[in-house]
Amino acid sequence: MKDDLSAFVLSLLQEAPASGGALIERVQAARPALLQRRAASTYAQLARLVARGDVVLLAEGPGERVYGVAGARAQVPRPPGPPNTFGLGPKQLIQVDRVLHRVTRGLPEHFFHELRHAVVVAADRRVSEGMPASRATRDALVDLGPPSAVRRVLRAAARGRPAPLRPRLRARWIVLAAAILALVIVRVTVLGVHTVPTNSMAPTLMAADEGGDARILVNRLAYLFGSPQRGDVAVFRRRPADDLFVKRIAALPGEEVRLVGGDLFIDGERLLKERPLLDRMRVPLYGLEDFEELEEIPAGWNLKQPLHTGFRLPDGTIERGDLACREVVLRLVVRASSEPCTLTIRLEQGFTPPNTVTLGTDRGRIVVEGHVIHVMARDPKDEQHSLLRIRTDRSREIWITNADRSFRVEIDGVEVVRTPVRRYGTFLSVRLRWFDNPPILEQLEVARDLYHAGTEEARIWKLEPDEVFMLGDNSGQSRDSRHYGPVPVTALEGRVFAVVWPWSRLRWVR
């Protein structure tokens, strides 16, 4: 196509000398397929022909240049003036000038005049054929080619070198090869792609051969430029020849670790997980879709069974688990359907007195028996009144946590109650009851805290300054630091941050 356009431009100049703008006009009229909305490429062919010596500059006027074949100097015409226009109004001419001034800024003046000539003639011809003036002007400008590419062609032509409007195939291959090379470098140095061999980290990561997570992404730079954080899901090798392990960082360098009753003790104190860490480590079990009876029993709903160290399988079923876990994390998003409305959430932990949270459209009340905490806010002037009040015009997010031997209530991100729990009983009962008008439950999630099974001798591990303690989320099926001891920080190969295959399991890893 480039050689065809060059040959046709040369044949037109052999017939009669012409300016760049006139050449564009004549090519568009005779063989428009050669341009295909890249009319400015005519300048690249002119530069090519001039460099070869086939075409010479015959005259240079105030606005345009005239080109012709070598030996045609006796036929030098006068440089043409601005073309006559009958179909374009002042508004369209101003639009043409504004676009072309931007494209030719800093370049020889004749480029502006010659492009203006070509655009005005092309637009005027379209108007004469019945096209509206504004659309004709727009189409004529588009026919020049992309503005950035047109400017590149004009700059090259000003230096006497051709520059095609369309990128060369070689350049495309170079860009593609560079992109592939960059991806390979990122893959080797930054990202690792691994499989999950077992369910030791379930439900956070499920075994690939059981329909779980076939491919996980690992940030290899996480521990080269940063420190391990409690709760990170990391990959490591105990020895260079070993396969990769995937576990969660439970304790940090220099800490003293002990596992008692499912909880983690750090430096002799039970680890009380604050909300961000609890969010990363909680195990969702039941959701609103699991409780169809909520719609059938307007008076309330009750879950009265032990929570175990089970988890939800990819097919949606619940694996019960072998160990009892009575640490519950309850999350609700609720809104009052109408006034009055009262919602009571009651947690019973066997021998411990029940913990009761009551929220209403006209009152709020939190009672923790045994530790004598009463938060009552019936007075509208009380600051707690609006915080403990469920509303009809706005949803409230409520977190009720009975974990790490601590009972906590959080409403819309504000912690309302925190009190210690002395001991847990043999069963868990979660009860929701409402009075007057039933509330609208937009979301409901019953989750449990991670349960770390201890050892028979209740061993204490003292970590060195360069060691971390790794545990699997599925404690009953995990072989981890409880069995082979702490892991050197240098053995950590990266932090798991996403599951990328299969698509049904695509998600970020907490």
Image (cartoon, helix red, strand yellow):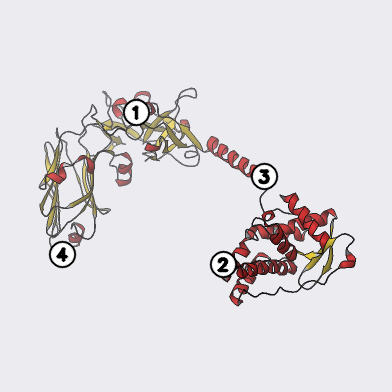
For marks 2 and 1 on the same chain, the one whose residue lies earlier in the sequence? 2
Q: Is residue 122 left or right of residue 227?
A: right
Distance of mark 2 from mark 1, alpha carbons?
Answer: 66 Å
Q: Check disc 3 and give the amino acid type.
A: Leu
Q: Which labelled disc corresponds to residue 200?
A: 1
Q: Earlier in the sequence, mark 1 or mark 4?
A: 1
Q: Earlier in the sequence, mark 3 or mark 4?
A: 3
Which of the 4 quarters of the picture holds residue 456? Answer: top left
Instruction: Describe the element under mark 1 as helix, strand or loop.
Output: loop
The alpha-carbon separation of the residues under discs 2 and 4 comes to: 65 Å
The residue identified by callout 4 is: 380
Q: Secondary structure at mark 4?
A: loop
Kindly identify the amino acid type of the residue bearing the numbered disc 2. Arg
Amino acid at the residue labelled 4? Pro
- The answer to whether one can see residue 79 in this image is yes
Question: Which of 222 and 203 lies nearest the eye of the viewer?
Answer: 203
Task: Give percent across and percent down for residue 507.
Answer: 39, 41
- Residue that carries the numbered disc 3 in the rendered image: 169
Nearer to us of marks 3 and 2 is 2
At x 26%, y 54%, the residue is 412
Q: CA distance from mark 3 to mark 1?
A: 51 Å
